[in-house]
Image (cartoon, grey):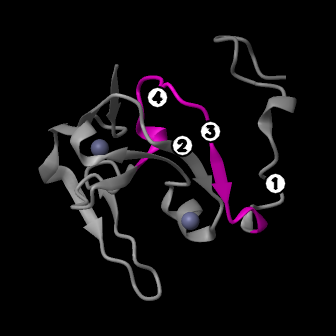
Amino acid sequence: MTIKGSCACGSVRFAIEGTPSGLGTCHCSRCRKLGSSSIIFIKREQFSLLEGEGHIETIQPRAPYTYTRSFCRSCGTALGEPLSPDKSFPINAQCLDSDPGIAHSFHEFSEDRPVWDAPLDILRDIHSTPGEPIQ
Ligand SMILES: [Zn+2]
Ligand SMILES: [Zn+2]
């Protein structure tokens, strides 16, 4: 199974072969503000950057943080760590264009989750029917 992914403008495109190691959400303020709370973990050999390496900007963390973060310099989409030299690294799950084939398996720092961030399935989806006017 090939999982495709891209940034919002399409400059950065990637493919993942096989099943990711995990899918989780971090509720800490840093991940939320950087726009990459939900991440999939993949192994280096599963990942192919198809296009856009020159569009990827990487932010080095300030202590005490240790993880770098990358984004598309054209559209600002948070990408996770696609240029990481590590054997396993995170990719922003929001960048996926196809089903990763796994369900959410963990979340962390749930004490930092904002009070408004409740499960959304109980809410009315105001755009589920295209063209229907909002009341
Ligand atoms: Zn982009
Ligand atoms: Zn976090």
Q: Earlier in the sequence, mark 3 or mark 2?
A: 2
Q: Which residue is mark 4?
A: 100
Question: What mark, if any, has residue 116 been given in the picture?
Answer: 1
- Looking at the image, do the residues carrying marks 4 and 2 touch, with CB atoms under 8 Å apart? yes
The image position of residue 80, as x and y in percent, is 38, 54
- Neighbor class of circle 1 (other Cα within 10 Å; few <14, some 14-19, many 20+) is few
* Viewer can see residue 133: yes
Q: Secondary structure at mark 2?
A: strand
Question: Circle 3 is placed at which residue position?
Answer: 104
**Where in the figure is residue 114, as x and y percent of width and height?**
77, 61
Tell me what residue is drawn at x 75 percent, y 24 percent: 126
User: Of the residues shown, which amino acid type is indicated by label 4?
Assistant: Pro
Whether pointer 2 and pointer 1 mark residues with C-beta atoms closer than 8 Å, the reply is no
Dot in front, 2 or 1: 2
Q: CA distance from mark 2 to mark 1?
A: 22 Å
- Mark 3: few/some/many CA within 10 Å (<14, 14-19, 20+): few
Q: Are marks 3 and 2 in contact (CB under 8 Å)?
A: yes
Q: Is residue 12 visible?
A: no
Look at the picture and state if 64 lies above or below 111.
below
Q: Amino acid at mark 1?
A: Trp
